[in-house]
Image (cartoon, rainbow, N blue to C red):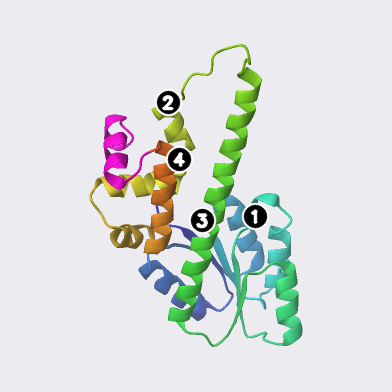
Amino acid sequence: MPLTILIAEDDEGTRLSLCDYLELEGYSVLMASHGEMALRQVFSHQPQLIITDIGMPGLDGFSLVQKVRQYPAFRLLPVIFLTAHNQTQDRIRGYQLGCDLYLPKPFELRELGAIVRNLLERSQLIQSAWIQQVALNTAQQRALQTSDVSEEIMPWTPDPADLVADFTAREQDVLTLLSDGLSNAQIGDRLFLSPRTVEKYVSSLLRKTETSNRSELLRFAISHHLVP
């Protein structure tokens, strides 16, 4: 499933140009011509990244980001300010409100594309690490609640159902593509990730399944029906 990017821009030409370019890069794109529309789409569609102009009618870009950051679920949502407002005080205010990057107009679409990919990769890694930590904390709490020190400690064997629940959506995508025989570079092209990021997901899968290489991982996944 492609990652979703929200573009908040009142200039129609810029908005459509960004949309066309990002869709060609493989992303799903939402568009808003003003801040109020963008804010509604943040809550209704929960995009993975926002690109917003500052000078928009009604709710401007600064106010949009300020409102979005008030909600814990969106505090790590990557935000790019794309604007002609390039004074030092404007940039400082943008960073204080929580934007990740301030790109002045005019801009190069290829540069913006590289920035978008970098921010999304970092965001996905942070989200994956957070989900894994939550799962680990939950497992540890369950173990403490159910353990009995008088009982003999038995060796632990991974349960396939537990493994699937512990896999992040991105790890499951990587595992499925590995089972199709794709390389890191090919998987990265499909999922819009760098080969290095794909390798990190593979390492996580090896650790969770307690396998030592890709061949063992695939045999384990097939024997336990973890891939189609």
Quadrant in the picture for the C terminus: top left
* Residue 226: percent from left, percent from top: 33, 35
In-image side of 64 versus 196 (left or right) = right
Gap between marks 3 and 1, in whole Å?
A: 14 Å
- Say whether residue 91 is visible: yes
* Residue 114: percent from left, percent from top: 46, 74
Residue type at mark 4 is Phe
- Where disc 1 sits, the SS reads helix
Of discs 4 and 1, which sits in the foreground?
A: 4
Disc 2, disc 3: CB below 8 Å?
Answer: no
Front position in the image: 200 or 50: 200
Q: Which residue is drawn at the image coordinates 25% and 54% (left, top)?
A: 182
Q: Which residue is drawn at the image coordinates 31% and 62% (left, top)?
A: 185
Residue type at mark 1 is Phe
Residue highlighted by disc 3:
124
- Where disc 3 sits, the SS reads helix
- Say whether residue 60 is visible: no
Disc 4 packing (10 Å; few <14; some 14–19; many ≥20):
many
Q: Which residue is drawn at the image coordinates 55% and 62% (left, top)?
A: 49
- The magenta stretch is 211-228
Q: Earlier in the sequence, mark 3 or mark 1?
A: 1
Residue type at mark 2 is Thr
Q: Residue furthest top?
A: 150
Residue type at mark 3 is Gln
Disc 1 packing (10 Å; few <14; some 14–19; many ≥20):
some
Q: Earlier in the sequence, mark 1 or mark 2?
A: 1
